[in-house]
């Protein structure tokens, strides 16, 4: 991924936290015949190696898992908040006009080799981790044990586990760091007026970078 120095995002803990907060990954792997892309939720297990590992599952009907016998080079992209930035928000538009549109976003890419796991106990553990990651903060968290055991046993036969041991993480914070201060202020004010939570989240992130630039 292209990473200008002013968009650097290389703090391991921060990148791992980003994955926790945006667990639906765009997983691209090399398989027979070319690249294969799938969108699946992952849970990050920090306890394996310096970067951790990603755990997930796919439907047994999905042919991708059959092509992972020897491990498939993969990248999983975790996109955070993103929004279009119009030059109409920039004071520079009125003073000199030398401004153009851009797009702000936060993303983390996890690189490694993916493998398929058919062990039902292993898969059950992954499903439990995935469920707890999303349910634990809810007022009445749902647990796998809330469903009939025979029903869950049948579902376990219908899925295959996916493990990706992360070789490296790379991220990018594109938050108007290369714009003039006044134009960044205009960006924050414009994002706060947008009617969606992603824009407001980006406004907070742009403000957080003011102390650094």
Image (spheres, rainbow, N blue to C red):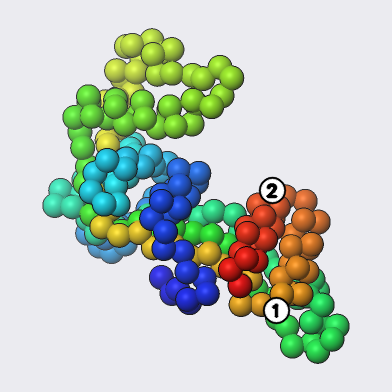
Provide residue 117's location: percent of width, then percent of height: 21, 37
> In the orientation shown, which residue stands out farthest toward the right?
94
Mark 1 or 2, nearer chain start? 1
Q: Position of residue 41 (x, y in %)?
A: 42, 41
Q: Which labelled disc corresponds to residue 197?
A: 2
Q: Name the disc covering residue 60, or none.
A: none
Instruction: Return the residue found at the far front.
Output: 211
The residue wearing badge 1 is 180
Q: Position of residue 152 (x, y in %)?
A: 34, 18
132 sits left or right of 183 in the view: left
- Which mark is in front, 1 or 2? 1
In-image side of 131 versus 179 (left or right): left
Q: Give the side of residue 77 with respect to residue 191, left or right.
A: left
- Would you say the residues marked 1 and 2 are in contact, meaning their CB atoms lie under 8 Å apart? no
Q: Secondary structure at mark 2?
A: helix
**Compared to 173, does 97 lie above or below?**
below
Depth order, front residue of 164/49: 49
Residue 103 location, quadrant: bottom right
| Quadrant including the N terminus | bottom left
Disc 2 crowd, CA 10 A, few/some/many (<14, 14-19, 20+): few
Residue visible at 48% across and 31% down in the picture: 134
Q: Is residue 90 above or below residue 152?
A: below
């Amino acid at each position: 991924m292209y990473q200008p120095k002013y968009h650097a995002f290389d703090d391991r803990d921060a990148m791992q936290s980003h994955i926790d907060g945006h667990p639906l990954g765009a997983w691209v792997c090399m398989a027979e015949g070319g690249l294969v892309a799938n969108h699946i939720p992952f849970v990050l297990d920090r306890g394996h190696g310096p970067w951790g590992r990603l755990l997930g599952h796919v439907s047994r009907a999905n042919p991708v898992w059959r092509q992972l016998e020897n491990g498939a080079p993969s990248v999983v992209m975790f996109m955070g908040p993103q929004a279009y930035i119009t030059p109409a928000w920039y004071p520079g538009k009125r003073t000199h006009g030398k401004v153009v549109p851009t797009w702000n976003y936060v993303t983390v890419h996890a690189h490694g080799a993916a493998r398929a796991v058919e062990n039902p106990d292993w898969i059950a553990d992954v499903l439990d981790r995935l469920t707890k990651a999303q349910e634990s903060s809810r007022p009445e968290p749902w647990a796998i044990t809330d469903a009939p055991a025979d029903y869950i046993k049948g579902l376990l036969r219908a899925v295959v586990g996916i493990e990706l041991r992360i070789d490296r993480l790379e991220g990018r914070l594109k938050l108007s760091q290369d714009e003039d201060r006044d134009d960044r202020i205009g960006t924050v004010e414009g994002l706060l007026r947008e009617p969606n939570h992603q824009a407001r989240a980006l406004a907070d992130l742009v403000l957080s970078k003011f102390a650094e630039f």
